[in-house]
Amino acid sequence: MLGILRRKLAGWPQLFAALSGLSVAACTGPAPTAPAEEYLECREVYTPVRGRLYDRNGTLLVANEVTYTLSIPKGAPLDTAAFNKLMGWPEGALQARVFAARLPAPPPPHRPAPVPDSTGYIAPDTAKPKPAPPRAQRWPIELAITKPEADSLRRHAREYPRLAVRRRRTRANVASLAAPVLGYQPAAAPEFLYLAQKLARGRYYRLRNSGLEGYYNALLAGHRGAYHPLTDGHGRVHGAWATDTTFQQGQNLHLSLDAKLQAYAERLLGERRGYVVALDPSTGEILACVSAPTYDPSVLTAPGRNAERRALLLDDENRPLLNRPAVQASPPGSVFKLVNAAVALQLGAITDHTPFPCDQSLINCVHPHPQARNLTMALKYSCNPYFYQTLRAVVEPRPDSAATLADTVAQRHAHLMAWRRYVRSFGLDTLLGVDLPREQPGFLPTAAYYDKARRTRNWNFKSIYSLSIGQGEINLTGLQMANVLAIIANRGWYITPHFVKAVGKGGPLARFTERHRTLVDSVQFAALIPGMEAAMQRGGTAELASLADVGITVAGKTGTVQNDEGDDHATFAAFAPATKPKIVVAVYLENAGFGGLSAAPLASLLIEKYLRGHIAPKRKKWENWLRCGDLASQGH
């Protein structure tokens, strides 16, 4: 269709430009073929408009907008007072904006600490301090200005001949949501990438998260078309004098994100450190993905904001530029007991009726509870000794075995590797393949890993027991934790989590429609559900997060991750409704204490918000508490 239209309008490139976007048409002169006076070599170039990003309900998230920048070259003489007056800026505004746009100064030169002599005397330092290295700067400096300011400067262009005003299309995050997920157009962030490389060094790789804009860049950008008609003086086309390139308009992306749920989750987390992932288990579509604390996405691409970019890059405490759900792998805590229980059931190490005593000599149980007479009670009370003995039954040689010591070591290795093979089928210790760059695989230990770490093959279960409660060497990302709950919700299968549900007028990428099955049978997952429901009931570890009062049955599991450097981290993962799940939520809050008192209520609010559209009055008070309360002090 495009080729037919081009041929009909061969002599009218301006009209064609109005129909399909920006074009450049030029004719260079007669072709070298006869009759020379009748043929011209023309070139028509059509540049596509970059595609937009919408949420699952059609809300515009990222669009194109026209912006103006002022380019100031090195050494340009300026009457700053007159310039500020012309632009309508307050006194000193130009100097302040130029200073903010400049690159930060490098660190001062390192001076070794004085070394005392044998008597302890420290000689005074008489050496002259080395001058600080010059402040690096990439010229010209660019400042963002408005259209009226650009028009004013153009009218006075003769007074400022060395200044340049540029008009260009840029990306605008309309809703200012999901900054780490939506990301940035790589070509639009050269200053950020340069600064990240200069300041972050070893962390540069992890900070280069261009999000969906980078992952789907080729589809969003489209393809520029260049056509080379050979025309006569009447505009008629007589073939082509060079090879054409097909024009392809930029594709819009329709995301699976729910903008309202995303905004609500970001508001609940506020300035806390942690993440939230919510997805639809039946499709793998990610409904919300929050990495907290977040940041203003325009900081990375807007000109003149190097000071803010520097602050983001050097914030080692909060690390706002990390997309935590995708790149931060952490111990999952007691949420991992669900995986261990499913594998133990599959391998026949336990049944859903197996009792284990709450033996505090094996491992500490942090809260008193009745004896776990079966798996359901163990999950309800999250009994640590129960799951210690569950994994021990998987890894240790069977009590009735008459094997020698060498055979026992070999059996232990074989059992651990069998456990790992089943656990890996949950999508762990590997890349899930989500449509985001820089995703991390997490980690599951192997028998060889323990041989090297313990410096002997003769290790026993007591040296690796932390695996039973989801700590020690196990690391999962937030996307993997949410996917584990999706597997349980689906009774054994999952579709790779993804953010884009439709490209243009089509569907998602083909690999986001395939089902992946675990090595655990569906009946084993069904055995977990009663215990997960019981955890939300009276006496359970997550009873505070129950939604029974509004008719929603939630199946969940709490977790508290031990932290030697401060307050424990709180985790919780759940799905609802328990019988026909529509949403899975995984929460990880750093230094927030018990999962049942902080992470579980937050997940409960998100589930209620998504399924009902509003929060019951009795739970509205949780919103401020989760944002501002001292979560780690609970339970003490």
Image (spheres, rainbow, N blue to C red):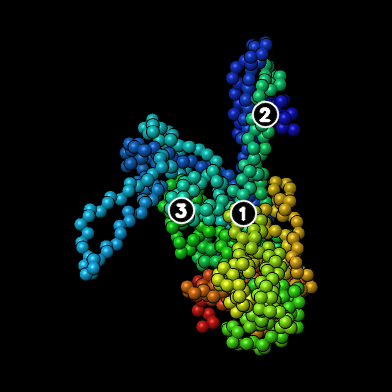
Q: Which residue is mark 2?
A: 244
Asked which secondary structure carries label 1, the reply is: loop
Q: Amino acid at mark 3?
A: Arg
Compared to 192, does 347 lie above or below?
below
> Which of the two discs, 1 and 3, labels the residue nearer the N terminus?
3
Residue 90 against residue 235 in the figure, above or below: below
Q: How far apart in space, not on screen, are marks 1 and 2 (Cα)?
A: 33 Å
Residue located at (41% from left, 52% from top)? 307
Residue 263 image position (x, y, % from top left): 59, 61
Structural crowding at the residue carrying mark 1, measured as other residues with C-alpha within 10 Å and reported as few (<14), some (14–19) or many (≥20): many
Lower sequence index among marks 2 and 3: 3
Mark 1 touches mark 3? (CB < 8 Å): no
Which tag is nearer the camera, tag 2 or tag 3?
A: 3
In the image, taking residue 535 as reference, residue 566 lies left or right, namely left
Instruction: Indicate left or right for 399 with 301 as reference.
Output: right
Kindly identify the amino acid type of the residue bearing the numbered disc 2.
Asp
Q: Please report the residue visible at 65 percent of the width from the left and 44 percent of the height from the top.
A: 219
The residue tagged 1 is 436
The dot on residue 120 is none
Q: Amino acid at mark 1?
A: Leu
Image coordinates of residue 240 in percent, x first then y, are: 69, 23
Residue 201 image label:
3
x and y, in percent, of residue 562 in the image? 54, 75
Task: Tell me which residue sits at (61%, 75%) in the image.
Answer: 458
Q: In this rendered view, identify the residue nearer to me: 548 or 491.
A: 491
Quadrant housing residue 486: bottom right
Q: Nearer the viewer, mark 1 or mark 3?
A: 3
